[in-house]
């Protein structure tokens, strides 16, 4: 893939539309609005067809004209094109006509959707000549920066709140990154990382590389549409941390419509956050015009615990403008959501996946999400990284001797327990109806 990308023009302010060159810039010098990548869609429309895309390798770079790097992909060339799984048993449990799971629990190489944004950010950082990279992270971004930097021979500094799950900490450390735990919230970490980027001149993927980084999330939307046979779904439910992914799924759908790759349609976009850190959901539900930051997040859903989300107002606008809505389930509902997804699809998601399933359940029950629709759930991270969240749910497993007699005796014991449980539930039911 040696050709130059001539389709990406530069950066543009999201608020005042002022144009900037495609440099290491992320805020508008006129109005302090965030900068976004600007493309030449007429030129892209002339070269990009469904056939062209389908003829390419099954990874996120099959949409490379719509991604902001100038030359070849140098970091993360195998990322993306994760399975879109039709989940009939989950659909039945949720009471929805059709459910699909976009399964980024198996994204390459670090089992979360963050590999998409990091592939773009680090490929672009190398084009600028950076040799040291880093991030502020709630865990998954740190894992992905650490792994992708290792494969590219870049030095990495990842800063995280000090109370993250052990799986997320080890999953950065093992790649040789410098992992720094900060006593504070994600917002404290993020502020520090902005200062570090300025003083040390490093590429911090979600700070000074943010316009490039954020575009990587669009590939989740492109893949959903392609995997549905070049159609947009009726609805999508996405987890939200900083609020970037949900905006970029919507942007991806709009780009496909603009390029004539899918028929025009507005997919209703729904967002999910945990009750214990819900600034974007709170903005939507209270019909407010601004984000009220959550100062001290309190939830097991650490990957989404951003109290002052950078793209919060844009995420809220995405939900409003597409006819979507949002929900903020409790930690108990999140754990139930993880188990429901696992038991009906065989997919073990992290807490963000539990929130997404639990939010969908609430949205269907309240009628905000039409039960007669085809819904895609974005399942963005792997459950093996957040085992703590469900450890308390299970009893110790039984240990028996390696004989058939012992095994059969154990089966009888289980059967008795089930009968007792059944009997208890029958008698409670008859109480309840009496
Ligand atoms: C980072 C993350 C998200 C969403 O991130 P945004 O900041 O809203 O783009 C969703 N799920 C998981 C598991 C994440 O790590
Ligand atoms: Zn501006």
Image (tube, rainbow, N blue to C red):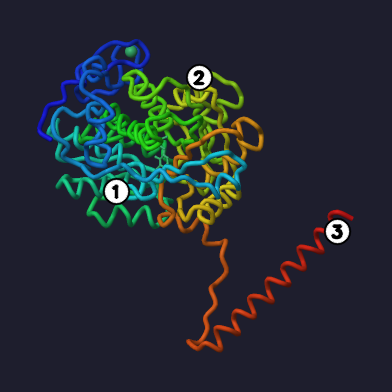
Q: Which residue is mark 2?
A: 321
Q: Which residue is mark 3?
A: 431
* Label 3 element class: helix
Q: Position of residue 17 (x, y in %)?
A: 32, 11
Q: Residue furthest left?
A: 2
Task: Quote the CA–CA distance across marks 3 and 1.
Answer: 52 Å
Nearer the N terminus, badge 2 or badge 3? Answer: 2
Instruction: Give the numbered dot on residue 108.
Output: 1
Q: Position of residue 279 (x, y in %)?
A: 52, 31
Residue displayed at 30% across by 16% down = 28
Quarter of the rendered image showing ligand 1: top left
The image quadrant of residue 13 is top left
Q: Is residue 17 left or right of residue 102?
A: left
* Label 1 element class: loop
- Asked whether mark 3 lies closer than 8 Å to ligand 1, one says no
Which quarter shows the C terminus?
Answer: bottom right
406 lies above or below 355: below
- Asked whether mark 1 lies closer than 8 Å to ligand 1, one says no
Which quarter shows the N terminus?
Answer: top left
Task: Quote the CA–CA distance across marks 2 and 3.
Answer: 48 Å
Nearer the N terminus, badge 2 or badge 1? Answer: 1
The image quadrant of residue 216 is top left
Q: Nearer the viewer, residue 38 or 192?
A: 38
Q: Position of residue 16 (x, y in %)?
A: 35, 10
């Amino acid at each position: 893939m040696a050709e130059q990308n001539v389709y990406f023009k530069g950066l543009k302010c999201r608020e005042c539309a002022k144009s900037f060159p495609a440099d290491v810039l992320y805020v508008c010098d006129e109005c302090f609005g965030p900068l976004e990548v600007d493309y030449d869609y007429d030129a892209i429309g002339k070269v990009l067809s469904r056939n062209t895309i389908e003829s390419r390798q099954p990874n996120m770079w099959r949409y490379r004209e719509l991604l902001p790097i100038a030359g070849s992909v140098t970091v993360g060339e195998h990322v993306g094109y994760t399975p879109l799984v039709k989940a009939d048993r989950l659909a039945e449990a949720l009471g929805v006509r059709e459910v699909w799971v976009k399964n980024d629990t198996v994204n390459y190489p670090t089992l979360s959707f963050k590999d998409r944004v990091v592939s773009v950010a680090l490929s672009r950082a190398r084009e600028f000549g950076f040799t040291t990279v880093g991030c502020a992270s709630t865990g998954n971004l740190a894992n992905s920066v650490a792994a992708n930097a290792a494969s590219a021979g870049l030095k990495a500094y990842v800063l995280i709140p000090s109370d993250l799950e052990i799986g997320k900490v080890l999953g950065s450390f093992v790649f040789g990154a410098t992992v720094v735990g900060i006593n504070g919230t994600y917002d404290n970490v993020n502020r520090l990382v902005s200062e570090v980027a300025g003083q040390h001149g490093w590429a911090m993927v979600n700070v000074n590389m943010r316009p490039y980084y954020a575009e990587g999330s669009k590939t989740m939307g492109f893949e959903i549409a392609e995997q549905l046979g070049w159609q947009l779904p009726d609805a999508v439910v996405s987890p939200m941390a900083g609020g970037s992914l949900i905006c970029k799924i919507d942007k991806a759908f709009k780009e496909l419509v603009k390029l004539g790759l899918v028929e025009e349609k507005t997919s209703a976009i729904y967002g999910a956050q945990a009750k214990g850190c819900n600034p974007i959901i709170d903005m939507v539900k209270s019909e407010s015009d601004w984000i009220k930051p959550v100062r001290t997040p309190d939830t097991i859903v650490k990957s989404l615990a951003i109290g002052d989300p950078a793209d919060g107002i844009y995420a809220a606008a995405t939900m409003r403008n597409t006819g979507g809505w949002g929900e903020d389930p409790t930690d108990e509902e999140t754990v139930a959501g993880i188990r429901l997804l696992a038991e009906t699809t065989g997919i073990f998601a992290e807490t963000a996946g539990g929130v997404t399933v639990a939010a969908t359940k609430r949205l269907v029950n309240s009628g905000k999400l039409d039960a007669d629709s085809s819904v895609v759930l974005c399942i963005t991270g792997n459950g093996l990284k957040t085992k703590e969240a469900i450890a308390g749910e299970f009893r110790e497993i039984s240990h028996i001797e390696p004989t058939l007699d012992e095994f059969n005796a154990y089966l009888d014991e289980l059967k008795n327990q089930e009968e007792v449980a059944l009997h208890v539930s029958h008698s409670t039911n008859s109480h309840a109806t009496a």
